[in-house]
Amino acid sequence: MKSPLNGTDTTYDVLGIGFGPSNLALAIAVEEHNAGLPPEERLNALFVERQPSFGWHRGMLIGDATMQVSFLKDLVTLRDPSSDFSFLYFLRERGRLTDFLNQKTLFPLRAEFHEYFEWAAGRLGHLVAYDHVVTAVRPVRDDSGVVAHFDVVCRDPDRPGRTVSYRARDISVAIGLEPHVPPGVELTERVWHNSQLLPRVAEFTAAGTPVRRAVVLGAGQSAAETVDYLHRSFPEAEVCAVFAKYGYTPADDSPFANRIFDPEAVDVYFDAPSEVKQSLLDYHRSTNYSVVDMELIEALYATAYQEKVAGRERLRFLNVSRIRDVRTRPEGTLDIRVEFLPTGEQQVLEADVLVNATGYRPRDLGSLLGEAAKVCLRDDGDALRVDRDHRVETAPDVTAGIYLQGSTEHTHGLTSTLLSTTAVRAGEIHRSLVARRVAAR
C-alpha cells in the first residue's frame, strides 16, 4: 500500500502503532463512531503496521488448535453486542453460522479466528498503512512550548532509504510481544522459536530433510502444542519434551478463577495497593502462564502410554530437566546437553531440531518511543505510570496523549496482553479520545 499523506499535510486525531487485534478493535470503534457523523465530528485515524498484511501468530495456526477464550470475547461483542464486526456476524457472512453452532463450543479453531481478524481488518483497509516500520516518535511543541502532537516517523515502503512522517494529537501503541529465548541461544535453521513452527516444519518437509529426533524446550500451552504437532508431522521421529517441572500444569479455567479476566476486575486491580496487585498476579498466574489445557495434557499422556504398550516410544518427557548446552555438529545436526536437576546427571541428545517454546516478552517501549519516552512519567519501580483510560501520565507541558494496549500488567492486570478485554479496552480508549477532543475545542 502506498503511504498516506505525509504528516505535514494531515494531523490525525489518533495514530495507532501496530495493527494486531488490539488496535484493530480500536479502529472498529473509531469506524463505528464516525458512521453517519458530519466530517467535523469524526475522528481522523491512521494505523501503521510493520507487516505487509494483517497477521496474528501465523506460525502457530495449527489446523486443529482452538482458541483459549470464548468467541464472545471477540473484537466488539463485550463493547457492543449489536456490532456487525462480531465473530457471529463474520460466520453469517461466511455461511457457517449454523454449522458453528452445531458444534456446541465456545472455542473456535485458532485458524478460523485468524480468518475473522483478517475479515475485519480487510473492511478497514482505508485506515491502515502496512509495511510501515516505525523508526522514531518525536514530541512536537507548539508556539507556547507545549507538546501538542507527536510525529511518528516510518520507513517509506515506496522510497527505499527514505522516511515518511505522520503527525497526531494522540497515539495508541499496540506493538504486541516478541519471542523470548533463553540467554545465549542463537536461532538458526535448526534452532527455532515456536512462533516459526509451521513455516519451519513446512521447509523441512518440502526439502525432504530427515528429522530423527526433535527436542522441545518449555512447559506451557505452546510447548505442548509444539510437541504434539511435531509428533504428528514427523511420524518416524522421536520427540523429546524438556521442562523443569515434574509435569505439565493444567490451566485453571474454572468459572471463579476466570473472573480475573472480567472487565470489572481491571477496576479492582487498578485501584488496589501494590502488594495486593502482586498477590493477585501470583494467585492467578495459573490461568495464563506456563499452563496447558487439560484435554491436551491427557491426549499427550495417552499417546505416550500407548507407545509404551506397543514397545516403540517416540514421545519422551524429560521432566525436572534443563538444557545446559547446544552445539552444532560438523554435519549440521545438534548435540543438546540435558541435565536432570535432582541428581545433576547429564545426557547428550543428538537432534535434528530444537524448538524453544519459551514464551514472549513485552517489546521495549523505550526504544520505540525514543524522544517521546522522555515526556512520560515513571513510578518508583521505573515502570510507566498509566491512567485508568490506558493513557500514559506525562509531564505537565504535554497535552498530546500516548495510549498503551499492552505493557500495562503492572497497572491493569493479567488482561493487559490478552484478548479477554480487547473490545472493552478499545471502547475505553475510544471514549477517552472523544472526550479529549471535545475538551480541546
Image: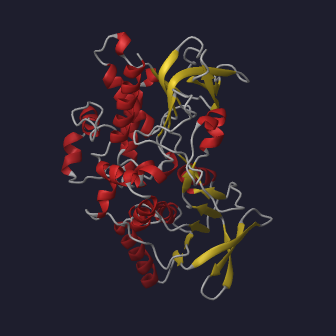
Q: Residue at x 75, y 62 (%)?
A: 332
Is residue 173 among what the camera can see?
A: yes
Residue 72 drawn above or below residue 90: below
Picture quarter with the N terminus: top right
**Number of marks drawn:** 0
| 6 displayed left or right of 43 | right
Image position, residue 73 (x, y; %): 31, 46
Q: Residue at x 42, y 50 (%)?
A: 412
Toward the bottom, the furthest residue is 343
Q: Quadrant of residue 273?
A: bottom left
Residue 88 drawn above or below residue 196: above
| 88 displayed left or right of 336 | left
Residue 190 drawn above or below residue 140: below
Image position, residue 127 (x, y; %): 45, 23
Image position, residue 247 (x, y; %): 46, 77
Picture quarter with the C terminus: top left
Is residue 123 among what the camera can see?
A: no
Relative to the observer, which residue lies in front, 20 or 217? 20
Q: Quadrant of residue 88?
A: top left
Image position, residue 323 (x, y; %): 65, 72
Q: Residue at x 37, y 17 (%)?
A: 42
